[in-house]
Image (tube, rainbow, N blue to C red):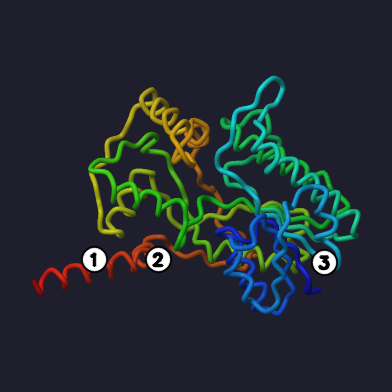
């Protein structure tokens, strides 16, 4: 069975835009809710995509699912305020990672939508809502639990490692820091990651959507190579043309730096909860399951191409300088 009309929560985001484009290329109707329509203007031009300006909260999910036969949940936040009192995860993580999946399950039941693909995070473990080291991971585990308890739905859970690609907020962040700073002070420099290309994540999501063998199962999504954070920052600097020295910070100074970033204006580059997440390696012991339909690309092969625009800009500057 090919699901013909799909609700994609988080469809205007980094991973979501790749998922939506692939679904549209297959001729499927796609519903993408967004708080601000202009943020999804790159999707509006796709012929089978319906961008709906809405908060996509629990009250609107049933309306959004009208006429759909599947739902994909990509919503996630990397940072959130700490909870007070008995709030175990904080309001931001609770709303995005726990309450929204629970509401989506209820909306699917109300509309008779059985197929649900939920994207979580590598590092999450079954039953880990109390034992994992960060509020981010614990809230993700609690959200998975809401999905897994829905035995009347045909759900699949995917746990990707850090996702890279053009316009990501991972390698590009490190490249930007090295463009602006003479030295990079780095906490958790030896934390290990297994990055996966955004195109492979999108391919896996679209592939499992119609695959009954994936119902009721949880899969890791990780690339073929493992790197330390120090190595990833170094490569981002080299590929963008702004490699800087890296100073690894001990735990105490690293947490102080993250605390300062939490109170800096705008979105924090790092938080103490992010550091807590990095106390466990973001790697998968098993290769990608063949049922996901993905042969993962290597970061070492794709990485240099992520910053081609930066390379062209440097070349133009050199040529301009040479003509003087």
Residue that badge 2 annotates: 302
Q: Quadrant of residue 117?
A: bottom right
Question: Which percent across, then down, holds residue 41?
Answer: 59, 68
Crowd band around label 1 with a 10 angstrom C-alpha radius: few (<14), some (14–19), many (20+): some
Q: Quadrant of residue 318?
A: bottom left
Cα distance, mark 3 to mark 1?
47 Å
* Mark 1 residue element: helix
First-in-chain label (2 vs 3) = 3
First-in-chain label (2 vs 1) = 2
Question: Which percent across, then down, holds residue 51?
Answer: 69, 66
Cα distance, mark 2 to mark 1?
20 Å
* Mark 3 residue element: loop
Residue that badge 1 annotates: 314
Reply above or below: 90 against 301: above
Question: Which percent across, then down, holds residue 75?
Answer: 65, 51
Contact between marks 2 and 3 (CB within 8 A): the answer is no
Residue under the image location 46 percent in, 60 percent down: 167
First-in-chain label (3 vs 1) = 3
């Amino acid at each position: 069975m090919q699901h013909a009309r799909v609700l994609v929560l988080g469809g205007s985001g980094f991973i979501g835009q790749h998922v939506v484009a692939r679904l549209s290329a297959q001729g499927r109707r796609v519903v993408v809710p967004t708080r601000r329509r202009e943020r999804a203007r790159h999707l509006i031009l796709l012929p089978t995509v319906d961008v709906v300006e809405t908060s996509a909260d629990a009250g609107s999910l049933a309306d959004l699912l009208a006429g759909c036969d599947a739902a994909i949940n990509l919503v996630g936040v990397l940072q959130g305020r700490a909870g007070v009192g008995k709030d175990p995860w904080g309001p931001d993580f609770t709303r995005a990672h726990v309450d929204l999946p629970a509401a989506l399950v209820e909306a699917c039941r109300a509309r008779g939508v059985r197929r649900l693909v939920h994207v979580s995070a590598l590092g999450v473990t079954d039953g880990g809502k109390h034992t994992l080291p960060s509020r981010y991971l614990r809230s993700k585990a609690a959200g998975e639990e809401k999905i897994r308890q829905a035995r009347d739905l045909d759900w699949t859970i995917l746990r990707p490692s850090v996702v890279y690609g053009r316009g990501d907020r991972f390698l590009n962040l490190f490249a930007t820091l090295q463009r602006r700073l003479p030295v990079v002070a780095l906490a958790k420099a030896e934390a290990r990651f297994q990055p996966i290309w955004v195109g492979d994540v999108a391919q896996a999501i679209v592939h499992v959507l119609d695959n009954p063998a994936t119902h009721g199962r949880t899969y890791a999504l990780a690339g073929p190579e493992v790197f330390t954070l120090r190595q990833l920052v170094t490569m981002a600097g080299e590929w963008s043309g702004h490699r800087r020295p890296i100073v690894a910070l001990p735990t105490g100074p690293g947490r102080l730096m993250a605390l300062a970033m939490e109170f800096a204006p705008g979105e924090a580059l790092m938080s103490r909860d992010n550091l807590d997440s990095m106390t466990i390696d973001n790697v998968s012991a098993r290769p990608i399951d063949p049922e996901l339909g993905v042969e993962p690309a290597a970061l070492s092969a794709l990485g240099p191409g992520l910053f081609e625009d930066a390379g062209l800009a440097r070349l133009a500057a050199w040529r301009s300088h040479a003509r003087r």
